[in-house]
Image: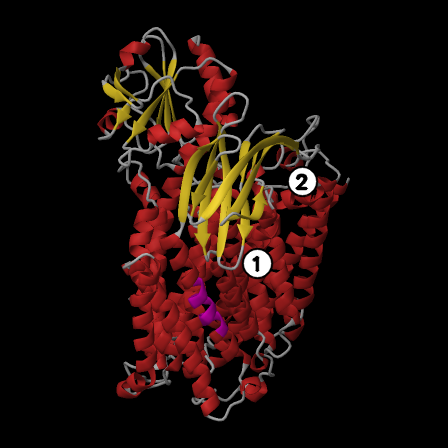
Amino acid sequence: MIPELGHFAIIIALLLAITQAVLPLVGAQRGNLTLMAVARPAAQGQFVFLIIAYACLVYSFLVNDFTVENVARNSFSQLPEVYRITASWGSHEGSLLVWVLMLAFWGAAVSVFSRHLPDDMVARVIGVMGLISIGFIAFLLLTSNPFDRMIPPPPDGRDMNPLLQDWGMIIHPPMLYMGYVGFAVAFSFAIAALISGRLDAAWARWSRPWTTVAWAFLTLGIVLGSWWAYRELGWGGWWFWDPTENASFMPWLAGTALIHSLAVSEKRGAFKAWTVLLALTTFSLSLLGTFLVRSGVLSSVHAFATDPARGAFILGFLAVVIGGSLILYAWRAPKMVTGGAFNWFSREAMLLANNVVLLAAMGAVLLGTLYPLLMDALGMGKISVGPPYFNAVFVPLMAPALFLLGVGPLTRWKGESLPDMVTRLKWALAVAVVTGFALPFTLEGFNPWATLGFFLAIWITLSVLIGFRERLKHGARLSSLPRTFWGMQLAHFGLAWGIAGMTLVANYEQEKDVRMNVGDHTTLAGYTFTFKGTTEHDGPNYRAARGTVEVSRDGKLLNTLHPEKRIYNASGMPMTEAAVDYSFTSDIYVALGEPLDDEAKTWAVRVYHKPFINWMWYGATLMILGGFLAASDRRYRIAVKKLEAPAGAVARGA
Amino acid sequence: MKRWIPLVLFAVLVGFFAKGLFLNPREVPSPFIGKPAPTFTLPVVGAAERTFSPEEMKGKVWLLNVWAPWCVSCRQEHEVLMSLVRERELAIVGLNWKDKKREAEQLLDQQGNPYVAVPDDLSGKTGIDYGVTGTPETYVIDKSGVIQMKHVGPITPEIWEKKFEPKLKELGA
């Protein structure tokens, strides 16, 4: 009964999505206020019915209703309750339901937080979001119904993939989807502006907070995924350039470019066509990511379904949405007048450089991700593109962009004098260069990659400090600085912090694979690891060999770690559960390999010392907070009439 | 005309995706199926004086698993192979592919060795003879030395049950 209710709720949501798309769009074209007024209640109604559907799905998982195929395939009677809830988005069908639920959430959010926008704009934005909803709900109902029954039911479920039974996975997918889907708002604003032909500074200002919030969620999702991979895959790596990671990283790069180019469009009215194209591109990449992951065209540890019907549906949908929006763009592009001339050395030029580099990096990732597919489609054989390609291309592309990041925010709009800038930054540059070179010598001697990383981290940090100092010198108080300024500086500093962490961990991590008998010890990075043997340990849905490893330094016991080797009952899949001692300056990471004798006394043990890896997560957290802070700036909430005049050229809080 | 560029680029991409949908990244139609397994003689990892050649396996149904210590999915597969050989009699030969850093011996010592022999294909030439596209890949070779099946990608317990188990039964392993 409950699953049928859920199915029914999805159908009602589809009908509401059709209403939400058709009536307001027609109304906006005809200037009919009654039709336009349908937008808000329809969007909110769609959200409510999708919540009901989703609640039904979670309920089916919680009560172990194995007559529902989705539950039988992805859950298990012994699965702990919290994972039964997360299993609801662990499957293809469930994750799509979360996708449309998020989309409806954003639609409802626009309907609530748009009081200051003109009616026809709201109607068009919500209408376009309704169109996207129609496509995805239809996909859900036609090819991937999460409530399909399986009668007679199997005696027990097949269990959730043990890799996903981790608390990092509890919130990673929803956050990632919040980001992916959130770019639908920027996309809809761009389409609405293209339809109405009103591509002005106001359009850019309305899009900015939505884009920034979506970006912050996407950042959070990506970081949680990376953190999960680090803890759960047992190899101590945190980024693998896996196609699915790339699928989330591409919209992130494009979204980052979009945030910056929206600033120019808002403040200076320049790059409008480019900004619109970026808004379309960013969401298109989200859709592309969905296609790549869901259709199984690329083999990946994450790929869920290899069902050609699903792939064909998403591809068709992709073609309609992206193709349609690009046709609209090409048709409307001549109407977009770009205003505001600028010098080669100005804030505009810096942001343009930022955009070019970010998009080039995105293109490189796209090429690397699709290259195997392209070669295969051309009949040129099967190949794979690995981390060496991405590292070789990505680092040289990003390094100059990160250098400019130190200059850009201090540059004036329209034009800036180079000698002036040199005077303002020469000390920062000198300090960054000297420390960048000196730091590696205090560690392990000359290392050009470490120097580059330290230089960039220090350079950006100093530039952030100079930004604050110059603002304060001009009479501002810390408390009176706008949140957009704080947000930007926080995000930039977070990036610098993250770069420092990445540099340290990439260049100075140590690992050791050792064979250990009970009582054996080994040393790494000054720590002594003593293996105390393993004990049998029963989890709720797995059996584990639980190792005990004592970590000590200079004869003093620091911590006792318990890495596990688990066998999951339902799937029989072996899993390595690493044990990590987290601290501000380093992680000590211990993983059990294989037992090397029959009595399981001797084990292969992997120990890692990861200096400052936490700094990456801290830095990313600041970037996310910066995003939310900037999006909450009060000037985005001021009613439309007061801001109809072009924004002042003196404003500097991009 | 500039404004049509994004659309044209996108159309080209869609063309590729449409084609890609009907290709299975895991299923490589190997021209080697039904043909005798290419022969080779290679030194064996961990046994300096020994060599291995497929002729030694005549009369047995066996698996040729192409792996490498640098390959991440091979490590996942390694655990599955270990549990397979613990449960049953199974002749898996592990072709150690392009192990430039010479890590295979140490790795097998520490993590366990599921293989009956580990021929060392340092140059990667033997892999090319077999049409290896990446690691891991597994070939099923019958009693008369003919390749009967090829699997691309790591073996999971599920794939083993669905794909290998029936094939091995059919071949009388």
Q: Using the image, determine if residue A138 lies above or below residue A305.
A: below
Direction from residue A63 to residue A141 in the image, left or right: left
Front label number (2 vs 1):
1
Element type at marker 2? loop
Direction from residue A105 to residue A495 in the image, left or right: left
Amino acid carrying label 1: it is: Met
- What is the span of residues highlighted in magenta in the rendered image? A490-498
* Mark 2 to mark 1 CA distance (whole Å): 23 Å
Q: Which numbered marker is on residue A147? A: 2
Q: Which residue in the structure is indicated by mark 1?
A: A178
Q: Quadrant of residue A536?
A: top right
At a point 50% along the width and 79% down the height, the residue shown is A485
Residue A571 placement (x, y as % from top left)? 59, 29
Element type at marker 1? helix
Task: Identify the mark nearer the N-term, 2 or 1.
Answer: 2
Q: Nearer the viewer, residue A465 or A93?
A: A465
Amino acid carrying label 2: it is: Phe
